[in-house]
Amino acid sequence: MIPFLLQTLTFATPVLLAALGAVFAERAGVVNIGLEGLLLVGALVAVLVSAATGQPYLGVLVAALVAAALAGVFAVFAIGMKRDQVIVGTTINFLALGGTGVFYRAIKSTGEVKTLPVLFGDGSTAIHGVTLLGLLLIPLAQWLLYRTRLGVMVRSAGEKPQAVAAAGVFVNRLRTVTILATGALCGIGGAALSIGIGNTFTEEMTSGRGFIALAVVVFGRWNPLGVLTAALLFAAADVWQTRLQADGKLHIPYPIFLALPYVLTLLALAIRGAKVKPPAHLGEPFEQG
């Protein structure tokens, strides 16, 4: 049981970090469906930097910065220029999906990829520092969102942006900060996937985790603790299907196993998503008066 729980924590890390950033962005009124692309860019950058320098944590840092920069591009178009947020996010995903593959093939590193040091556990049950970071960020995010003035401003920016602006807050500036933070967390999440769970980069290796993170935010009702629960449920299903495949006792085509966590996520979203209420002004541009 303990190995299963440890592996679940490790597998949950990329989705948890991406979803945690999305909680703040969506609470502030911005929907960014480009999480998949941001995760993918983070995964690639972490591998390249780790192989070039032999410093995996430097890879995590650079991955966070590069993904935050890409999120900044989203902010320029979606917040600054008030373009449709869904279209801009989709463009980010397409750019990342195509660009990472081309870039990786063009400059493929020959250096040895250094994976994140193991804190405890072994093999597939190993826990590294990024997983620990993700868990520590949950209570911090809960405190920030519900116990601080910053949290009040973020939540109000998504519910009543006019009222926040009337109080002297620059709503679009606040929304941009949440988007940049989302990008940084996605970059770290991508690094957790490529040099934490694995030790290499492969094209489309995120396998829809960015979209799962968006579903996790809804399932978790835009609450960090709820997001943690939802991310663990998805990861547990992923670990379960992996173990069922390895066991080999069930003679079922492997695509069915691979689809299991996604099907469970869709079912959970269909059941719980119908009962949740998103921030009132989610996805709507704001013009500061």
Image (cartoon, rainbow, N blue to C red):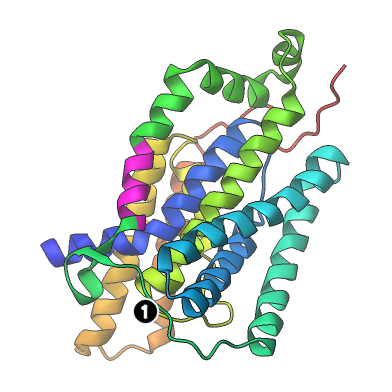
- Magenta stretch encompasses residue 133: yes
Name above or below for residue 9 compared with residue 138.
Answer: below
Which residue is found at the position 47% from the left and 18% from the top?
148
Nearer to the camera, 4 or 197: 197
Q: Nearer the viewer, residue 240 or 16?
A: 16
When asked about the image quadrant of residue 114, the answer is bottom left
* Residue 196 visible in this rendered orientation of the protein: yes
Residue position for label 1: 257
Is 87 on the left-hand or right-hand side of 33? right
Q: Position of residue 187 (x, y in %)?
A: 54, 58
Name the main secondary structure of what is drawn in magenta: helix
Check the picture and name the quadrant holding the C terminus: top right
Q: Quadrant of the N terminus?
A: bottom left
Question: How far across and down, in percent of the image, does residue 18 sit?
Answer: 51, 52
Is residue 212 left or right of 91 when viewed as pictured? Answer: left
Position in image of residue 47 (x %, y %): 50, 75
The answer to whether residue 90 is above or below residue 102 is: above
Secondary structure under tag 1 reads helix
Hey, which residue is sitting farthest front in the picture? 53
Q: Give me the residue at 67% from left, 48% from top.
A: 32
Residue at the spot x=61%, y=60% of the render?
38
Residue at point 58%, 46% (across, down): 182
Observer able to see residue 270? no
- Point out residue 15 in the picture as x, y percentages from the top left corner: 45, 57
Location of residue 224 with respect to 5 vertically, above or below: above
**Three-letter amino acid code at disc 1?**
Phe
Q: Is residue 219 magenta?
A: no
Residue 225, quarter of picture: top left
Find the magenta span and give its range: 130-138
